[in-house]
Image (tube, rainbow, N blue to C red):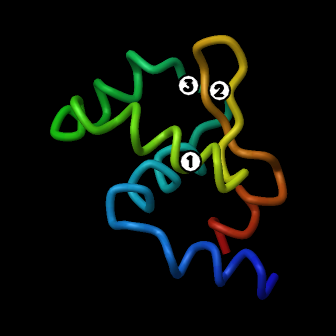
Amino acid sequence: KDILRQQCDRLSDREKQILSILARETQPLKLAKLIDKQPNLNLELVNVLQSLQRRCLVEKIENSFWLSPLIKQYLLI
């Protein structure tokens, strides 16, 4: 739990926004849906998602993004 807290404390506001969106979803979200939900991040979204993937906070399956149950549970507490 401390490791997750430390990781989340280091995130940018934009990264936190994306994690918040993904935490509320029940299914993986396609990139187009994420753009619809955060149109102001359109140009930055790919970079933000790549950063979250490098930190192992977001997983990608084909062109969809999701959170592992552990990450989701931590964010929704």
Q: Amino acid at mark 3?
A: Leu
Residue at image x 68%, y 27%? 60
Residue at image x 79%, y 46%? 68
Q: Is residue 54 above or below residue 46?
A: below
Q: What residue occupies the far bottom of the structure in this picture?
A: 2
Residue at image x 63%, y 43%? 53
What is the C-alpha distance between the residues marked 2 and 3?
4 Å
Which image quarter: residue 17? bottom left
Compared across the picture, whether 51 is left or right of 73 comes to left
Q: Position of residue 14 (x, y in %)?
A: 33, 56
Residue at image x 31%, y 26%? 35
SS for callout 1: helix
Residue denoted by label 1 = 24
Mark 1 is surrounded, within 10 Å at the Cα level, by few (under 14), some (14 to 19) or many (20 or more) other residues, namely few
Residue denoted by label 3 = 29
SS for callout 2: loop
Q: Position of residue 24 (x, y in %)?
A: 56, 47
Locate the C terminus and report the quarter of the image it occupies. Answer: bottom right
